[in-house]
Amino acid sequence: MLERGIVKKFPGFLSELQQQLESLPQASLLRITRYGGLDLHDLISLILEPRDFTVDCPDEVPQDEIFHYSELKSSESGQTLVQNNEVAFCILAGGAGTRIGGPKCLLSLGNGETLLSKKIRQAADLKNIWVIISPDLKESVVDHLTERSLMSNHIKIVEQFESFRLTPNNQLFLLNNEASLYPCGHGDVIPALVQSEVLQKFNENGGKHVYVVNVDNISANIDPDILGLHHDNNTPVTCEVVARNSSDSGGFLCNHMGIPQIVEGFRMSYDTDQSKFTHINTNTMILQSNLDFNSIIWSWYRVKKNYNGNLIIQYERLLQQLTCHFKTQFVEVERARRFMPIKNISDLDYIKNDSR
């Protein structure tokens, strides 16, 4: 357990941060000590020793190295995997929704449906549904699903990790005089599944693949043909991408150091012409469930966020690091069919109006 006084004395600009940390209640400190997350000592190390993850001169991925959904054959193996309960549906639902004013998973789509309930219904026939959420949301999510008669033994609620929000000058961001905690990004999904032993039990019961989707992408569900391609090619990771529009930002499909992978735009050097990249990430991917996930040394990225009108700093890890670590194949899917993310209020209003 963390005890007061174990934090060594730091010089200079960190002295105020140290005073803040020493004044925190024990319960607040304990929330960020779960093994596998970003604990206090790691957070301080990241502040003291900033790391540069800039990607210089990434290349385009040739079109003939990308599978196209329209050219995929109908797959019996994908259907068989679903019928035999050998695939898990993993819903990333931990986003704080800083751009939309509240937790995304509980946003209403009208007619009593929410983003999370819609995702659960898309996987209604599966025996393994995993919902990755922040600890603050667990009780609300369980109540939410119970009220809609969706909670069952097939659903596992898995808590991701937390850390402290910071100000731009590396002090604790305080909200109502209390340290503000945040979920550490969608890269938490693998460490959280490993530490919770959900992944281990799935493998022991004959599980083979994990289909990962964002809760805010209302079009993303299990596609048997893509699942079949993933399984038949025996590829560790299969990642869905879409043809890029000029207004798109986020993670780009590119070739870096000879490895086709997803690289977030904020990591690219200023002289990189991002307009040359033809595909963007959808954050939908399939993973072989028995991969050596413990071999990954996760990178923590310093990112800026707008939280309640305040500029704050968070350290997050990215799920897309899997595409760098494991051999990955990429499938271009139709945007209208597989990629309809809700990022802001206007997106939500559009979906509500379209469903009427």
Image (cartoon, grey):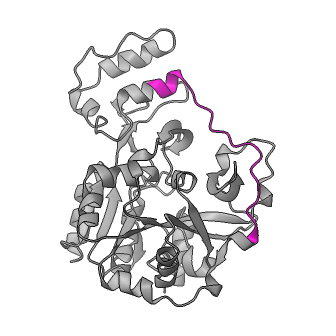
Is residue 233 toward the left or the right of residue 125 in the image? Answer: right
Where's residue 210, x and y in %? 39, 67
Q: Where is residue 233 in the image (x, y as percent from the top left)?
A: 53, 74
Residue 303, percent across and down?
A: 56, 40
Relative placement, left or right, of 16 versus 35 is right
Instruction: Tell how many labels.
Output: 0
Residue for point 48% across, 45% down: 317
Decide whether the magenta segment is chiefly helix, strand or loop. Answer: loop
Quadrant of image for the N terminus = top left
298 over 319 or under it: above or below: above
Looking at the picture, tell me which residue is in the foreground, 5 or 227.
227
Quarter-of-image position of residue 262: bottom right
Left or right: where does residue 271 sit relative to residue 193? right
Q: Does the magenta stretch include residue 62?
A: yes
Q: Give the range drawn in magenta.
A: 45-63
Residue at the spot x=31%, y=36% of the render? 32
- Residue at 32% from the left image edge and 63% from the top image edge: 131
Residue 310 among those drawn in magenta:
no
Residue 169 visible, this angle:
yes
Q: Which of 94 and 229 is in front in this view?
A: 229
Residue 39 at x, y percent in the picture: 35, 32
Residue 116 occupies which quadrant of the picture?
bottom left
Say whether residue 250 is visible.
Answer: no
